[in-house]
Amino acid sequence: MNISTSSLQSASPADRRNATIQSMQSQEFDLLVIGGGATGAGIALDAAARGLKTALVEKRDFASGTSSKSTKLIHGGLRYLKQLDIALVRETGTERAIVHRLAPHLVLPEKMLMPLIKNGTYGYWSTSFGLWVYDVLAKVKGDDRRKMLSKEQTLKHEPLLDDRILKGGGFYAEYRTDDARLTIELLKTAARKGGLALNYTQAVDFIYDDKKQVRGASVRDNLTNESFNIKAKRVVSASGPWVDKLRKKNGSLSGKRLHLTKGIHLVFPHRKIPLNHTLYFDVPDGRMVFAIPRGKVTYVGTTDTEYKGDLNRVVATKDDAVYLLNAINHALPTVKVDKNDIISNWAGLRPLIHEDGKSPSELSRKDEIFVSDTGLISIAGGKLTGYRKMAQRIVDLVDEQLPEPFGPCPTKDIPLTENSLKDAKAVEAYIQEIENRVKKLGLISYYGWYLVTTYGKQTEIILEKMQAYNSDTPDIALLRAETWFGVHHEMVNSVDDLLVRRTGRLYFDIESIPPALDIALADMKNYLGWDEKRTQEERERMELLLKDATTYYEKEMEAAPVV
Ligand SMILES: Cc1cc2nc3c(=O)[nH]c(=O)nc-3n(C[C@H](O)[C@H](O)[C@H](O)COP(=O)(O)OP(=O)(O)OC[C@H]3O[C@@H](n4cnc5c(N)ncnc54)[C@H](O)[C@@H]3O)c2cc1C
């Protein structure tokens, strides 16, 4: 992404990509980041904002790894309190309010209801105390502090709960986000600070100096298969589940290793699970699961199982689906959901750090940094919520190693969009305004909420662009405006970049994809100069993603053999 080069604003997307590639191979960077998930994007922003010459490469699309498959909460991680991971809870708890302030349209306050049931994980007093500690650690103030509810109050908030076993509830504050959009806004902000980022560009090997220190990477443009070198004083691998693969390539896979666990989410129509609030509820096996109402849907997750399958194609199995169906039917007996009620799913991998003898749910979510003898810095573990502090730790380390100091981390005060909305109230008011405006354009009011919580003030650009398509129906005009925006402002290079990660349609509005696919493909073919073969490959790829999002396989996809 190179939106800082004003002379390129009117250039075609292909020219801009070529200019970025040119720029990447013609200079030495202070820092090269490998991996365009939330962790890498956060590092790129921190480094670029401190003035480091920064480049980032991502082998597929930005956020196409774990950072589009999370529960999409910016949360302190209540359950880590039970594991006595106090430092983690304090850090992520405090970060929530900061990330909300930096992107109020994207990180929205969300009240959580934790029902207390007979023989449940937590009793009334332990919950009251736990939530109080949670608030104190995160410095939560005013109305956002936890409230303990009687059985009657809890049922008033959420009549779907099982009154035969309900004892009361804890009501507390967290935040909800869209992980992929957060990642893209981090990268756009990094680009405004002078950083360069390129998707579909894979680090295939490292470049070493004569002292055997990593000084860059040779990369392959996965759109053209052409290779080039990027020189950098320091290289950080923020490649999530692929961290150990790069450590192996670097000859430094020793000591601690990753332990991958899989988590899936199931999506239902909101009318089938019509919750008023997010629920964080007990599952009979002692785990806890979220059910989150969002726009047209309610999604439920997550699972936590060992994973040894294909890193590039993570799918939901029948066992995963049955586990979550049982969980929801146990907590909300009147909804009676079965597999026919599921509209879609997504599955992702947690790149956790292995600890001997611990089960997936017991592994710590703390991040760890590995520095190899050859100077490769790798970071894994951690949470989406903690991306900013993880980035700070990495860039502090890089800064110490570089001859010239670049100064302290500035990201606490860098909003994640241009022309950012001020706070949650401003977001609410803007949603109202846009709902009214989209109704006048012939769209249902849902799109007002959707546009603001997806794009913030950038909604204005999309609504203005819609006018160019006024001969189309309003839904199609909106899709075409989003396609144009994605390609020209957000480096959309594939139809799934648009329909999965920039617009979240695969996750929250899957029914809208089949009628949208041909229209999006036709416009992208035109903008990106695709031939028939490429257009057909794009269609097939999207069809495979739609299949995976609606299929429950007998077992995981097998990892491709290493050759
Ligand atoms: C089911 C589930 C639920 C979760 N829920 C939450 C939650 O609600 N809140 C929260 O805070 N956290 C949550 N998390 C954790 C959070 O999602 C992750 O910590 C975070 O997304 C990890 O981001 P990352 O950038 O480290 O990894 P990734 O997002 O996987 O990014 C790594 C990137 O590196 C790229 N890459 C790999 N190899 C190369 C290469 N050779 N060259 C170039 N690029 C490469 C990959 O394509 C990938 O895009 C959840 C995780 C899971 C699995």
Image (cartoon, grey):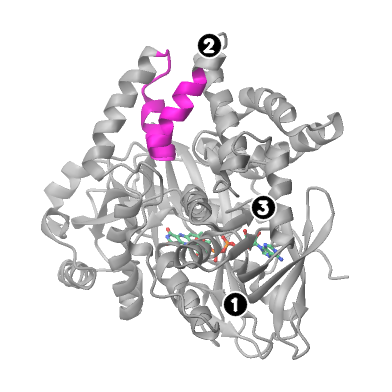
Q: Residue at x 86, y 33 (%)?
A: 533
Residue 61 as seen in the image, left or right of residue 428: right
The residue indicated by pointer 3 is 199
**Crowding near the residue tagged with mark 1, few <14, some 14–19, many ≥20 C-alpha atoms within 10 Å:** many
Q: Residue at x 54, y 25 (%)?
A: 481
Judge whether residue 243 is colored magenta.
no
> Mark 1 highlights which residue?
378
Say few, some or many: other residues with alpha carbon within 10 Å of mark 2 (under 14 / 14 to 19 / 20 or more).
few
Q: Label 3 to label 1, Cα distance in Å?
A: 19 Å
Q: Relative to 547, is 443 above or below?
A: above
Residue lying furthest front = 7
Q: Position of residue 557 (x, y in %)?
A: 73, 58
Residue 248 picture quarter: bottom right
Residue at the right extreme of this rendering: 563
Q: Amino acid at mark 2?
A: Asn
Q: Is residue 190 left or right of residue 81?
A: right
State which region is magenta: 441-466
